């Protein structure tokens, strides 16, 4: 690193352009990963995204990043970070029950993992100094920070334009501008992105356009920070998302449906799926038949889940998983507006969601609209290449390969071979 600094100083003193360094070894590469919540590929097509367009021209990309099921935020943020399916990392939904720990509700605490390792944990274990900014698992309630650099607060996402996102982008740019000896070699940053705007105003609204433009501008700022360093040969930038999004029109009143069919238990819902923990698991067959009679719903049985679900059979997984079919969705009654909660007991089983969400996610991964974006650019990355597809579990081993370190133990994904530059 000192030799590189001397070359830059010599070039400046001679009034010449900085001589580019030779190709860097993996153990000298910095990798920056930006994860934007709910950045659906449709937004790239609908709005101006010059920074992503540049990454597409000069790097590698796909608009077919398959999420884990359910295709909701915390499940997939943890899946991306660990490279494991939910059956192994243990975050099986945004809201679920654990027999020892109790109710999980959108928790970012690393202690909730039942297996696998977050990117920051893997990197730090192998001596790679890491910054984890609002990144899931950046802190542990029992072990403290899980990276050399973590931000003071985690995440507060409200509205279509997020000042917190802009502040986090400034922090990433600041970290990149540090001297070589101080700069973390792995920077992980979560951004609220366009998720809230899509949910509450629709995918073609002005609010969603502004959120998309802001997110792309953040990517542009990081690209500019790398350019300012003359560092494209030693910094790789990865931009991704946790899930896609699609328009919805009707909400499922699952509480009313369960009561009408005399199904006793506790339901916890998020996005388009609900976990139903039965009071008497022996009645699972009977309950599944009653729920499946509704054409708007698919019902999955614990112990007989399709292979693509990757949820396993731990005690965190409910007896029944109810998956709404588009354009229907499910949300917990306690997340409904207070004035509307009486509908759970007395209202219709399916309601027009006029005053609720306009778009959402959570459907099985092959459902149109659920796939996300993945862009890569810079050191070690190919140029002008479109990938046919990738999976959320593949991001972790791809990042570790760019860093020249081993992936976590265990890991379900594989490095995306077509993403890397051809050996010279």
Image (tube, rainbow, N blue to C red):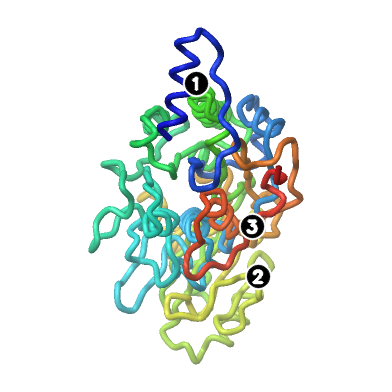
Instruction: Quarter of the image for the N terminus: give it.
Output: top left
* Depicted 175 relative to depicted 348: above or below: above
According to the picture, the residue beneath numbered tag 3 turns out to be: 391
Could you tell me how far apart the alpha carbons at marks 3 and 2 are, in whole angstroms?
12 Å
Nearer-N-terminus badge (3/2): 2
- Residue drawn at (60%, 53%) of the image: 250
Disc 3 on helix, strand or loop? strand
According to the picture, the residue beneath numbered tag 1 turns out to be: 228
- Residue drawn at (53%, 70%) of the image: 257
The answer to whether mark 1 and mark 3 are in CB contact below 8 A is no
Nearer-N-terminus badge (1/3): 1
- Residue drawn at (69%, 57%) of the image: 367
The answer to whether mark 3 and mark 2 are in CB contact below 8 A is no
Could you tell me how far apart the alpha carbons at marks 1 and 3 are, in whole angstroms?
32 Å
Disc 1 on helix, strand or loop? helix
According to the picture, the residue beneath numbered tag 2 turns out to be: 308
Disc 2 on helix, strand or loop? helix
């Amino acid at each position: 690193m000192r030799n590189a600094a001397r070359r830059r100083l010599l070039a400046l003193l001679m009034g010449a352009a900085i001589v580019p360094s030779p190709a860097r070894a993996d153990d000298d590469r910095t990798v920056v990963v930006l994860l934007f919540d709910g950045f659906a590929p449709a937004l790239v097509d609908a709005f101006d995204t010059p920074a992503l367009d540049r990454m597409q021209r000069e790097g590698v990309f796909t608009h077919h990043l398959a999420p884990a099921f359910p295709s909701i935020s915390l499940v997939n943020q943890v899946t991306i970070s660990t490279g494991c399916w939910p059956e192994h990392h243990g975050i099986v939904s945004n809201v679920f029950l654990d027999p020892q720990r109790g109710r999980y509700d959108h928790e970012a605490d690393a202690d909730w993992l039942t297996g696998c390792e977050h990117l920051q944990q893997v990197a730090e274990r192998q001596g790679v100094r890491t910054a984890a900014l609002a990144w899931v698992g950046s802190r542990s309630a029992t072990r403290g920070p899980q990276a050399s650099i973590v931000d003071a607060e985690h995440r507060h996402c409200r509205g279509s334009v997020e000042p917190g996102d802009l502040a986090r982008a400034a922090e990433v740019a600041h970290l990149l501008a540090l001297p070589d000896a101080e700069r973390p070699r792995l920077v992980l940053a979560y951004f609220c992105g366009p998720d809230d705007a899509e949910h509450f105003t629709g995918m073609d609204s002005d609010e969603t356009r502004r959120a998309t433009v802001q997110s792309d501008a953040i990517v542009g700022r990081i690209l500019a920070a790398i350019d300012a360093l003359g560092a494209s040969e030693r910094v790789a930038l990865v931009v991704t998302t946790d899930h896609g999004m699609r328009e919805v029109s009707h909400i499922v009143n699952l509480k009313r449906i369960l009561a009408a069919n005399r199904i006793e238990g506790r339901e916890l819902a998020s996005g388009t799926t609900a976990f139903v923990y039965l009071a008497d698991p022996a009645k699972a067959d009977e309950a599944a038949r009653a729920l499946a009679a509704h054409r708007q719903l698919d019902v999955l049985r614990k112990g007989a889940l399709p292979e693509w679900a990757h949820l396993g059979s731990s005690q965190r997984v409910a007896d029944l998983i109810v998956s709404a079919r588009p354009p229907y969705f499910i949300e917990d009654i306690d997340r409904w507006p207070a004035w509307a909660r009486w509908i759970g007991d007395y209202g219709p089983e399916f309601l027009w969601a006029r005053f609720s969400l306009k778009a959402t996610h959570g459907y099985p991964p092959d459902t149109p609209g659920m796939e996300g974006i993945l862009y890569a650019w810079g050191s070690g990355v190919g140029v002008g290449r479109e990938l046919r597809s990738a999976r959320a579990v593949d991001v972790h081993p791809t990042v570790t390969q760019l860093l020249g370190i081993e992936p976590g133990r265990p890991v379900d994904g594989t490095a995306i071979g077509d993403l890397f530059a051809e050996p010279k």
